[in-house]
Amino acid sequence: MMAQREAWYEDEEATMERHGLLGGQQVITRRGASTEHDLIRRREQIEDISQEITDVQEIFHDFATLVKDQRVEIDDIESNIMDTKEKTDEALKEVVMASDYSRRKRNALCYTLFFFLLVTVGVGIFAYELSGN
């Protein structure tokens, strides 16, 4: 792009010199003004790039802050998950113990009923034997 512009200026100057429109001093002044304009434009571009870099830096800083804040939340979530796992394990042990207790209680009730049934049948047979003889 820069080479094209320089070539255009050189062609333009050569054309103007052929027609006698410009003196040597005017050509240098025009080239100097063009160079000055290019320098100003480049300085503006550099300032734009600098501003964009600053914006990107702010974005990264904000991102780092978000990640740091989320890390605390993630640690809290992880801690809650570990607590939940421990409490779930304890609850499972309690359920197993309650199930065993319930089974033993049911068995004890069945044995007790069976014992009273046997006693009742024994007393009935004994009473029948006494009354029949």
Image: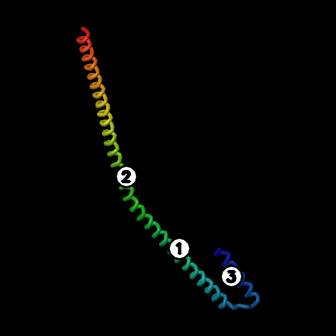
Q: Nearer the viewer, mark 2 or mark 1?
A: 2
Query: In the rendered image of this protein, does residue 21 appear above or below residue 81?
Result: below
Q: Residue at x 38, y 54 (%)?
A: 77
- Secondary element at tag 1: helix
- Secondary element at tag 3: helix
Q: Using the numbered discs, state the Cα–Cα distance from disc 2 to disc 1 in whole angstroms.
A: 42 Å
Q: Using the numbered discs, state the Cα–Cα distance from disc 2 to disc 3 in whole angstroms.
A: 69 Å
Q: Is residue 39 left or right of residue 116?
A: right
Q: Nearer the viewer, mark 2 or mark 3?
A: 2
Disc 3 marks a residue whose amino acid type is Tyr
Q: Quadrant of residue 91?
A: top left
Mark 1 / mark 3, whichever is N-terminal: 3
Q: Using the numbered discs, state the Cα–Cα distance from disc 1 to disc 3 in whole angstroms.
A: 28 Å
Q: Nearer the viewer, mark 1 or mark 3?
A: 1
Disc 2 marks a residue whose amino acid type is Glu
Disc 1 marks a residue whose amino acid type is Ile
Q: Nearer the viewer, residue 121 or 18?
A: 121
Q: Which residue is mark 1?
A: 49
| Residue 32 on image: x %, y % | 61, 86
Q: Which residue is mark 3?
A: 9
| Residue 44 on image: x %, y % | 55, 79
- Secondary element at tag 2: helix
Q: Which residue is mark 2?
A: 78
| Residue 65 on image: x %, y % | 41, 65
Q: Quadrant of residue 15?
A: bottom right
